[in-house]
Image (spheres, grey):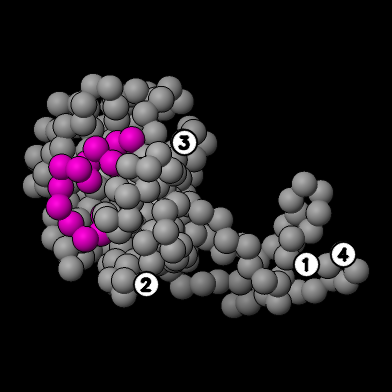
Amino acid sequence: MKIIAMIPARMGSKRIPKKNIRLLAGKPLLQYAIENAVNSGAFDEVWVNSESEVIGELAKCCGVGFHKRPAELSGERATNNDFTREFLECHECDYLVMVNPTSPLIFPETVADFVSFVRDGKYDTVLSVVEEYAECFFCGKPINFSVDRKVNSQDLVPVVKVVWALTAWKRETFLRYASLGKCATFSGELGFFPIPFDQAVDIDTEAQWKLAEGILLARKIDSEETEYWGEK
């Protein structure tokens, strides 16, 4: 089974200009996704998908492939369906895993576990999710609990939230859905892979940038012995 990684990285971004090459805790945001994909040891190939030659140079410096998408797929109106279909039409594989560069906190080991889950071959699409153990409402109605009684949060049925840090598609199924004009992003049989909350931060705003940078810097500090007030 051939599984390849695609890291989508446009140069344009309105909320955080040129965020994929902006330095986060000392290195370009995009570099985290590249290193996490490569260091996972899970892929036959790793590609950066972009319209930008500058991003292409960064990809080459990091030792991975560069797929230059067509100009018509370089704007914000280009959908995931569009650029993923174009990429898959150019690259043979059994499964494609999209590694999101705006999720730099994920560990290579988590990427490897995700790919192992994909290799089982049970699903056409695998989505990375976070499990929320909290009382949740939709349109004013409870969806995972009853308002008639209060239960401990750990006893709730978790609500799963798609976080897009990692997404996998079976190439054959994705292209079939796309050729029929259907939404291939959620094509076929869906599988869900939980990832830890602290690895799921998706950077779309300056506040999320600061949060991710703080976590990355904290990881560099040697862990100290846990202390408690009043205990010596």
Compare marks 4 and 3 and give the one earlier in the sequence: 4
Which mark's residue is nearer the viewer, 4 or 3? 4
Compare marks 2 and 4 and give the one earlier in the sequence: 2
Q: Which residue is mark 2?
A: 122
Q: Residues within 10 Å of mark 3 (few under 14, many from 20)?
A: some
- Mark 1 → mark 3, Cα distance in angstroms: 31 Å
Q: Is residue 38 left or right of residue 179?
A: left
Q: Are marks 4 and 1 in contact (CB under 8 Å)?
A: yes
- Mark 2 → mark 1, Cα distance in angstroms: 30 Å
Residue at image position (52%, 36%) is 207
Q: Is residue 203 visible?
A: yes
Looking at the picture, how far across and down is residue 18, in whole percent?
A: 32, 26
- Residue extending farthest to the front is 180
Residue 204 shows which numbered tag?
A: 3
Q: Are marks 3 and 2 in contact (CB under 8 Å)?
A: no
Looking at the picture, how far across and down is residue 138, in whole percent?
A: 74, 51
Q: Which residue is mark 1?
A: 145
